[in-house]
Image: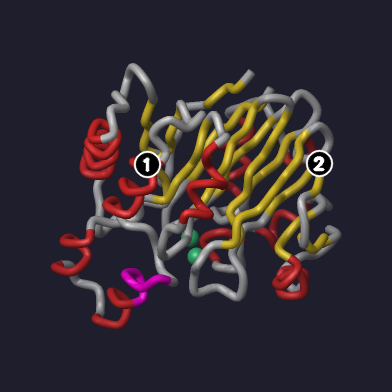
């Protein structure tokens, strides 16, 4: 059994709660400490109930609450080996474990996919518990066949749908920031996410969470509609064959339960 509860998602911060029968994992703690604790309380959890924090990469929108969290609670932290030292500098009373290979937390096995992002190192992760499989891949500038393979056997995925390219190009960001976001080391656009979803037709994926939306260069309707159209083009009907949800930056009530 896996239960996935996105808490926060976007450039203001990212945090997802992943629960099995015997472990509670936070994937990234990139929102305010108070905000994360409050979101956990709403789900009848406290920081002491969290068994591990798994970090994708070192950007602030993914690790912002780490210093405050580890000052209060010595939760073990897991991060890509290449940034383990960097992460250790932001941590107080917790151990930082470097991830090189697949590893196990309780009854959950965790595999990684290396994202293409302007970080020292950025991983997407796949969580497997029995026959339940969930992957989260955000903060990646392009998609590859390897990504499709990584997502293929998952029942549910969280995939980046960061921006609409036209909105970004017409928007107020500086030229260099636009170039960074559009580059192969930036973020997946709605259209790129749509290409990934098209390639996943026929896969095990039944639930799609669109995540890490830009507040300035995207909106939920556009991200949702682009994904629904892409699925439809490959014969996959939203509401019948797959469920698609857009994850909010600040407030999320959807939990995905996989048996
Ligand atoms: Zn990032
Ligand atoms: Zn990010």
Tell me the element at label 1.
helix
239 lies above or below 117: above
87 lies above or below 23: below
User: Which residue was labeled with disc 1?
Assistant: 197
> What type of secondary structure mainly makes up the magenta span?
helix
- Mark pair 2, 1: CA separation: 29 Å
Nearer to us in this view, 141 or 35: 141
At x 84%, y 35%, the residue is 106
At x 27%, y 44%, the residue is 223
78 lies above or below 1: below
Task: Specify start and end residues of the magenta stretch as a single range.
Answer: 180-184
Left or right: 198, with 27 as reference point: left
Looking at the rendered structure, the number of numbered marks drawn on it comes to: 2
Left or right: 254, with 26 as reference point: left
Visible in this render: residue 177?
Answer: yes
User: Which residue was labeled with disc 2?
Assistant: 105
């Amino acid at each position: 059994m896996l239960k996935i509860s996105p808490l926060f998602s976007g450039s203001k911060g990212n945090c997802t709660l992943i629960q099995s029968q015997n472990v509670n994992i936070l994937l990234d703690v990139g929102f305010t400490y108070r905000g994360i604790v409050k979101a956990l309380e709403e789900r009848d959890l406290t920081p002491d109930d969290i068994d591990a924090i798994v970090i994708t990469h070192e950007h602030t929108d993914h690790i912002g609450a780490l210093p405050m969290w580890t000052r209060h609670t010595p939760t073990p932290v897991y991060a890509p080996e290449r940034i383990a030292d960097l992460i250790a500098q932001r941590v107080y009373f917790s151990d930082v474990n470097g991830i090189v290979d697949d590893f196990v937390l309780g009854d959950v096995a965790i595999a990684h996919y290396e994202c293409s992002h302007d970080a020292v190192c950025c991983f997407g992760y796949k969580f497997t518990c029995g026959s339940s499989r969930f992957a989260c891949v955000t903060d990646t500038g392009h998609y590859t066949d390897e990504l499709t393979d990584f997502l293929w056997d998952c029942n549910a995925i969280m995939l980046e749908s960061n921006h609409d390219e036209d909105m970004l190009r017409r928007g107020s960001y500086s030229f260099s920031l636009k170039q960074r976001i559009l580059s192969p080391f930036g973020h997946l656009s709605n259209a790129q996410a749509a290409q990934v979803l098209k390639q996943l037709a026929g896969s095990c994926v039944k639930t799609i969470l669109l995540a890490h939306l830009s507040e300035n260069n995207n909106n939920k309707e556009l991200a949702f509609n682009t994904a629904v159209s892409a699925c439809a083009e490959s014969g996959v009907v939203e509401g019948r064959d797959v469920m698609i949800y857009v994850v909010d930056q600040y407030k999320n009530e959807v939990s995905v339960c996989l048996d």
